Amino acid sequence: MRKMIVGVAEKKKLLLSRAGMVANHVHLLLGCGIDDAPREIALAFLNNLAYAQAMKPAYRYSYYVGTVGEFDLGAMRTAAKE
């Protein structure tokens, strides 16, 4: 699972700072481009983690996005509308 998380981050050119895996979810602290859609990033991780588990869903089909730094929720809402 760890290798898959690191591999997805490298393939998508994301800056992976932290990854915390627990039984029913994963916490990721990522740096991404301003044009990267949170939904697409989440799906990339969910799909690849399912692949690593013999195509069985490893986690519930959901995600939560928060911001760190100078962005606020307005930035997330603007990106979601596009």
Image: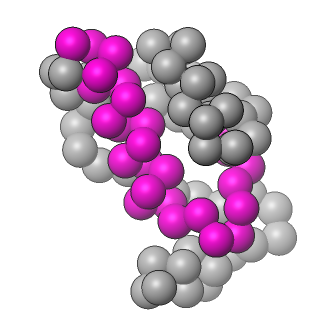
Q: Is residue 28 left or right of residue 64?
A: right
Q: Is residue 24 left or right of residue 13?
A: left
Q: Quadrant of residue 6?
A: top right
Q: Position of residue 70 (x, y in %)?
A: 83, 70
Residue 14 shows up from this direction:
yes
Total labels: the figure holds 0
Q: Which residue corresponds to the image point at 50% horizontal and 19% vertical from the top-left?
A: 4
> For residue 49: magenta?
yes
Residue 73 shows up from this direction:
no
* Residue span colored magenta: 29-54
Query: As displayed, is residue 38 above or below residue 71?
Result: above
Q: Quadrant of residue 52?
A: top left
Q: Position of residue 63 (x, y in %)?
A: 38, 50
Q: Is residue 56 left or right of residue 66?
A: left
Q: Quadrant of residue 18?
A: top right
Question: What's the colour scheme?
Answer: one colour
Q: Which residue corresponds to the image point at 59% horizontal and 64% vertical from the top-left?
A: 36
Q: Position of residue 16 (x, y in %)?
A: 71, 35
Q: Nearer the viewer, residue 20 or 47?
A: 47
Identify the residue at the far front of this view.
Answer: 11
Q: Position of residue 44 (x, y in %)?
A: 42, 43
> For residue 19: magenta?
no
Q: Nearer the viewer, residue 19 or 51?
A: 51
Q: Which residue corresponds to the image point at 55% horizontal and 32% vertical from the top-left?
A: 8
Q: Nearer the viewer, residue 70 or 11?
A: 11
Give the quadrant of the N terminus. top left
Identify the residue at the far left of this view.
Answer: 56
Q: Which residue corresponds to the image point at 73% horizontal and 49% vertical from the top-left?
A: 31
